[in-house]
Image (tube, rainbow, N blue to C red):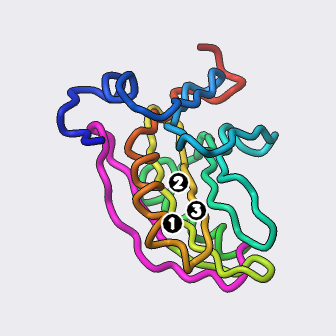
Amino acid sequence: MSTTAYATLEAWQADCPWQIVRDEETGAAVPCPPDWEVLRTPETRILLRQPAEPGRFAWNVTVTVERPEEPFADLVGYTTAVIHNMSLGLTDLRVISIDPVEYWGRPGRRVLSAHRAGPYAVALEQYWFLDGGVATTLSGSCDVADHLKAADTFAYIAHGMAAATRLPEEPR
């Protein structure tokens, strides 16, 4: 679905052929591919996943929301902090690219990296945006061998993402 014909994200989402999954507590929302599952976990605001198949790494997308503290409250500082934290927690992390993106007038970052998780080589494509002091991060994961196929899906979901406007504990 082309996005250039739409003046606003809200208009695009209203016409999107995919279900829009919303986190009412934060205001974050993303389009969900038709055959994917919506799962709930305490660690993520939104979790989408391909149906699981034995022996195969299911493509998945998570959305997390946080309020970064200074000096990490701008895109450069936040990007530096996130990549540093990823290097501490992901086995054999390799950052492949860090690119500026702008969706619906919101500047952000797209970071492509790879790491090991058990028997899998995992591609991790992340998009993050800071709006009103709130960081919304979308993380798409798949087997490295699947990334060329998954990249368009992850980009489409990121393009259709409404960033969070608040943390869950903050009033609406």
**Above or below, 117 relative to 66:** below
**In-image side of 75 versus 36 (left or right):** left
Disc on the earlier residue, 2 or 3? 2
Which numbered circle lies on residue 82?
A: 3
User: Can you see residue 164?
Assistant: no
Q: Tell me which numbered mark, 1 or 2, is placed earlier along the sequence.
A: 2
Of 38 and 95, the residue lying toward us = 38
Q: Quadrant of residue 104?
A: top left
Asked if labels 2 and 1 touch by Cβ distance under 8 angstroms, the answer is yes
Please name whichever residue, 44 or 121, is drawn nearer the observer in this view of the structure.
Answer: 121
The residue at which mark 1 appears reads as 80
Horizontally, is 19 left or right of 152 in the view? right
State the CA–CA distance, disc 3 to disc 1.
Answer: 6 Å
Would you say 101 lies left or right of 72 here?
A: left
- The residue that disc 2 covers is 72
Magenta residues span: 90-112
The residue nearer to you, when weighing 166 against 149, is 149
Q: Nearer the viewer, residue 31 or 34?
A: 34
